[in-house]
Image: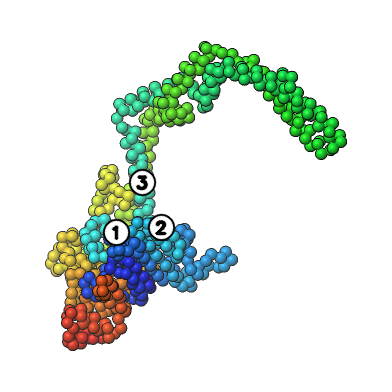
Amino acid sequence: MLTLLSISNIALIAELRVEFDHGLNLLTGETGSGKSIIVDALGVLIGGRVTSDLLKTGAERAFIEGLFSVAPSPELENVLAAAGISIPGNDSDEAAEPAPKDRRGSFEMIIRRELSTSGRNKIFINNQLATQALLREVRPFLVDIHGQGDQQTLFNSDTHLELLDEFAGASVAGLCQEVAECYRGWNALRRELDSLQAGESEKFQLADILKFQINELEHVELAIGEDATLEEERRRLLNVEKLTLLCAESYALIYEDKDAALTRVRLAEKQIEELAGFESGFNDYLEGLTQARSVLEDLAFSLRDFSDKLEFSPARLEQIGNRLAEISSIKRKYGGSIEAALEHLARSEDRLRQIDHAGERETEIKEELETARAAYLDCAGRLHRERVRAARKFERAVEQGLVEVAMEKAKFQIRISGPEPRSSKVVDDSNHFTARGSDQIDFYFSANVGEEVKPLAKVASGGEASRLMLVLKTVANASEFPRTIVFDEIDSGIGGRVSEAVGIKLKKLSGTNQVLCVTHQPQIARFAESHLLVRKETVGERTLVSVENLDRRARVEEIARMLTGAEITESARRHARELLKS
């Protein structure tokens, strides 16, 4: 249940706080006073689309915040827990026993949306950052909004299917998921088979290309790091003279010269050893000097050996150049590096194997397709039969609801068309078989005696569509958990006795759910448990929107205004009192 809605800088609203009660909450007021803005703001709060003109002119930021009192719902709590959202009074305590569902009370949820002209919008649930996707998951547990344009969606066959499945509830929900999974598996196999059955000439051409590339790469016999090793050898061959000179000079400095480094280190080592006989602290340096002497000796011998091996070879230099050119050509063709070329070789070999074994795989896929098709048809058949059973119950429930909104003579039928999934003659036509099954659902309707039922879009007038929408939505969306159901001008196109019947229907619905309704009909307004008057006033150069929760006297004045218009007569007040009294 929505208990508080706070709005800042939305459309005409600068600052507004509205408190709602249990039962039937009705919003009335002059046309253009801002009633629908409040409904739109609530829609945005629970995940609706944010448009550029939503923010108040001149404002850079806007805020919408709602406080909800939520009945215990394990499904909702699991969604919140998966997102890391804490629930007040339900902190985890491993030592504590969880309270039974029927003994736990409702908990509060605060949802807040911060909007900005820069597009950097933020969502908070219980003061923790949340995502738009999470908000969409939470929405069905909190609010169900039916706006002024919803009647048009009732003329769409997809909407008819959704309404029937919602009404059927758990009896088809699992089957719908099973059908969708079967369809995805079946469809994946069909796509793979289509790929394998692509033009034979194209496959042969591809096989020839792959064989050429594989032979070329295998002939080169690439090794990772080979190019770097060859480049180093090439540099060495090009600088033999310089390297020989460097080795000779370094060897002399370390080993051969009269005052070579190694000679001096040996002398220092001998003197420090003698000095340590008088001062033991110098013993610590002897090990380092010994290591230094060993390093110098090893370096001198390495320089000598390296110099002995240095030899300029024009033949080897040419061989290295040719090999590097060959490697460079391969790298340019196959990804820019030896690693990429080797990866291309592995992929080409794998693709060629697939082509070589395409016939075998095609036979396997055809067998798997038969199994997947049979599994899908079985699931779709069970879903079809369950929908047929649910359709009969839905028809009876809708016709009963139509009686309650003064359409006693109306008839409502659901026609399910499409191929019978159990039939052996069905074809694999994607227009018939989808992830939602094989059924096309169409609603047929007749409002008058003697008239045969016809497709809903051809026979329902504006007022009839409004009442039918109310009935369909309330019947289809009957849920185990109470929530806030919002109707924005459900009274469009109706009046008089029909309005009173709609009011009674809304009143009945408010017994199990909180109902918010924007209305212009006094016959509906009389049923309000909380009557909210929305006003728009001009103060200076600003337009202000306010909401007042009316007491009985104020309700008489507002209903009288709704009956007569701007000039309220005493007769209208008497009529308003009679409406409220009855």
User: Residue 524 at x, y = what percent?
Assistant: 24, 76
What residue is rendered at 82% in x and 31% in y?
273
Mark 2 to mark 1 CA distance (whole Å): 18 Å
Closer to us: 375 or 174: 174
Out of 114 and 543, give the one closest to the viewer: 543
Q: Is residue 254 left or right of residue 435?
A: right
525 in relation to 89, above or below? below
Q: Which residue is mark 1?
A: 51
User: Which residue is identified by label 3?
Assistant: 184
Q: Give the structural element (helix, strand or loop) at label 2.
A: loop
Q: CA distance from mark 3 to mark 2?
A: 28 Å
- Residue 207 in view here: yes
> Residue drawn 41% across and 26% down?
332
Q: Is residue 82 left or right of residue 480?
A: right
Can you say which quadrant of the picture contains the N terminus? Answer: bottom left
Foreground disc of the pair 3, 1? 1
Residue highlighted by disc 2 = 131
Q: Amino acid at mark 2?
A: Thr
Residue at 33% across / 28% down in the picture? 203
Q: Residue 66: x percent and y percent?
A: 38, 68
Q: Earlier in the sequence, mark 2 or mark 1?
A: 1
* Residue type at numbered disc 3: Arg
Left or right placement of residue 37 versus residue 81 in this view = left
Q: Secondary structure at mark 3?
A: helix
Q: Position of residue 397 (x, y in %)?
A: 27, 68
